Amino acid sequence: MDIALLEAAMAERGEPAYRTRQVWEWAARGAPGYASMSNVPARLRDALEESVPFSTLTLQEEARSRDGTVKALFRTLAGHPVEAVLMRYRDGRRSICVSSQSGCPLTCTFCATGAMQFGRNLTPSEILDQALYFRRGERLDHCVFMGMGEPLLNFDNVLAAARRLPDIGITHRRTTISTVGWMPGLTRFVDEVEEPIRLALSLHAADPALRSRLMPVNDRYPLDDVLAECRRYVALRGRRVYIEYVMLAGVNDSPAQARELAAVLGKDAFKVNLIPYNPTGMFDGSSRDTIAAFKQVLDRARIPNTVRLTRGRDIAAACGQLAATR
């Protein structure tokens, strides 16, 4: 739902401000459309049907994994592709992975999104409509901005969307915004975001030359500078930064590289998420034994860490696989 358009339409009709709140509250609770908004006058509902599309996105295709994960491919009103994922867990958690851009301009070599043509930043409403699509089917409790795009290249729109997620049922403490280390946005995040929204850094190599090979953004914003900004965030906000580290066979997964990662991170400020690589054609994923050996090095160094559970690999919905190829 285009909230700015909704507000403008209400103002043009001379409707009281509480009517806008009513409509948004219905949408945030999972209403399927205007017709179900029983405390909104029928004449107003009919007018909104004509002037404010209920969603800024059109569903093109939905894929369902054997593990219960659902991937949705949307198109914006201008035709830009956007993918989002719902992950269901046995403990009852319902987590969504949303996109902040159509495509991504930063071309990380292990990520399928970086290989597709970059479209544009998404608006707050286009980001929220990804969440609302899944909310219409079930309750949601976690959100990660780890889909298409670099969230901190779209800072204002991402924060505007994140700040409305509690209305949908996702608290700030259960919202995570990921970055490859885009410093202008990271500095703003550190200085401006007072809500307890989690910060995640996509790191993937502690060696600067290797990281630059995997992630060209490292040439522009070196890892040492990015980590210094993350430590400033920990000192200022008192919250840990989550490190994403995708395991690439023979590339970044040796015990020596684990020791290098532990030395770069140090203790207390970070928690590492080791991510089994989901094939996109360029690399192979590390074996379970290799990941376990890497984890053991981090354990010995007393670096908090976990191995992420892969969801939706069979429908190309897992980490790094979103590419909207259809």
Image (cartoon, rainbow, N blue to C red):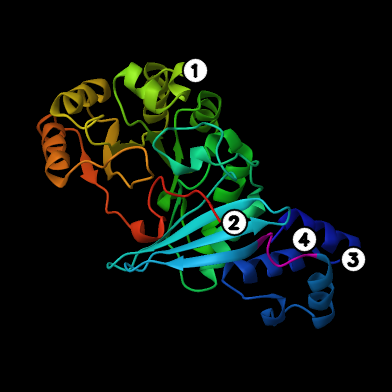
- Disc nearer the start of the sequence (2/1): 2
Which of the two marks, 4 or 2, is nearer to us in this view?
2
Quadrant, the C terminus = bottom right
Position of residue 47 in the picture relative to residue 137 (left or right): right
Mark 2–mark 1 contact, CB under 8 Å?
Answer: no
Mark 4–mark 2 contact, CB under 8 Å?
Answer: no
Q: Could you tell me how far apart the alpha carbons at marks 1 and 4 are, in whole angstroms?
A: 40 Å
Q: Amino acid at mark 3?
A: Arg
Q: Could you say which disc has been placed on residue 299 in the image? A: none
Q: Secondary structure at mark 4?
A: helix
Tell me, yes or no, if residue 167 can be seen here.
no
- Disc nearer the start of the sequence (1/4): 4
Which of the two marks, 3 or 1, is nearer to us in this view?
1
Relative depth, front residue between 92 and 76: 76
Q: Residue at x 19, y 28 (%)?
A: 258
Which of the two marks, 3 or 2, is nearer to us in this view?
2
Check disc 4 and report the residue beneath it. Answer: 6
The residues colored magenta run 52-57
Check disc 1 and report the residue beneath it. Answer: 220
Q: Could you say which disc has been placed on residue 13 in the image? A: 3
Q: Position of residue 177 (x, y in %)?
A: 46, 42
Q: Residue 91 is drawn in which quadrant?
A: bottom left
Q: Could you tell me how far apart the alpha carbons at marks 3 and 4 are, in whole angstroms?
A: 11 Å
Q: Residue at x 34, y 56 (%)?
A: 313
- Disc nearer the start of the sequence (3/2): 3
- Disc nearer the start of the sequence (3/1): 3
Q: Amino acid at mark 2?
A: Leu
In the depicted structure, whether residue 318 falls above or below residue 137: above
Check disc 2 and report the residue beneath it. Answer: 128
